[in-house]
Image (cartoon, rainbow, N blue to C red):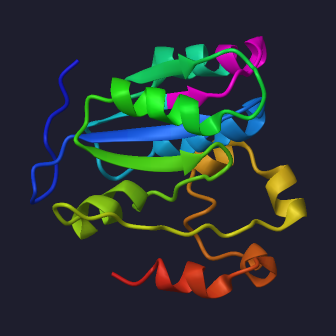
Amino acid sequence: MTLRPVGRLGLRLSVIVTTYNQPRALTLVLAGLGRQSLGDFEVLIADDGSGPETAAVIAGHSARAPFPIRHVWHPDEGFRKCAVSNQAIQEAAGDYLIFFDGDCIPTRRCLEIHVRSARRDGYLAGGAVSLPRRFGERLTPELVSRGALDRVGTWWREVNKPQRLVVSRIP
């Protein structure tokens, strides 16, 4: 598969999402990736031995996603997240890799910000904001697709690191 270069550095972008038996969370992550402001990327799901429910989620999204999705899986033999991540890195077509844990939902401009901030021979470390439990339990792929995480809401008052939400809105 051929990825088109994006950004001022002409990067080919691969997104690697690690997961293990969290199909609901993975669905939300894929919904977030499905609404990115930046196109032309691939997604590799680095799966540390999940069962058929996770495989079904990946197959369903693969059929309708605006980007290619590949399921990189190995058998469940205990915690081997790093091994399956390395396998996904080897299979990635991109020369710039962005990593997500399987429960980190990207906002609309996440990949765009990464690519805009990228430097040759460098790396960026992002951060996560833990959602309030009640809000997270009510979150659906449809709400993610409609931008619920990109808008200011009452849930902002309950997050663990509200300054990250504010700073992420600054151009």
Residue drawn at x 23%, y 66% is 116
Quarter holding residue 21: top right
For the N terminus, the image quarter is top left
Q: Residue drawn 45% across and 67% down?
A: 125
Q: Which of 13 and 112 is in front in this view?
A: 13
Q: Is residue 144 magenta?
A: no
Q: Give the image quarter of residue 78.
A: top right
Quadrant showing the C terminus: bottom left
The boundaries of the magenta stretch are 45-56
Q: Residue at x 60, y 52 (%)?
A: 105
Residue 55: say if magenta: yes
Left or right, 69 with respect to 42, comes to right
Give percent across and percent down for residue 67. Answer: 36, 29
In the rendering, at what x and y percent does residue 85 appear?
51, 35
Residue 117 located left or right of residue 153: left
Quadrant housing residue 149? bottom right
At which x and y percent is residue 73?
59, 18
Residue 156 visible here: yes
Give the percent coordinates (x, y) of residue 24. 76, 35
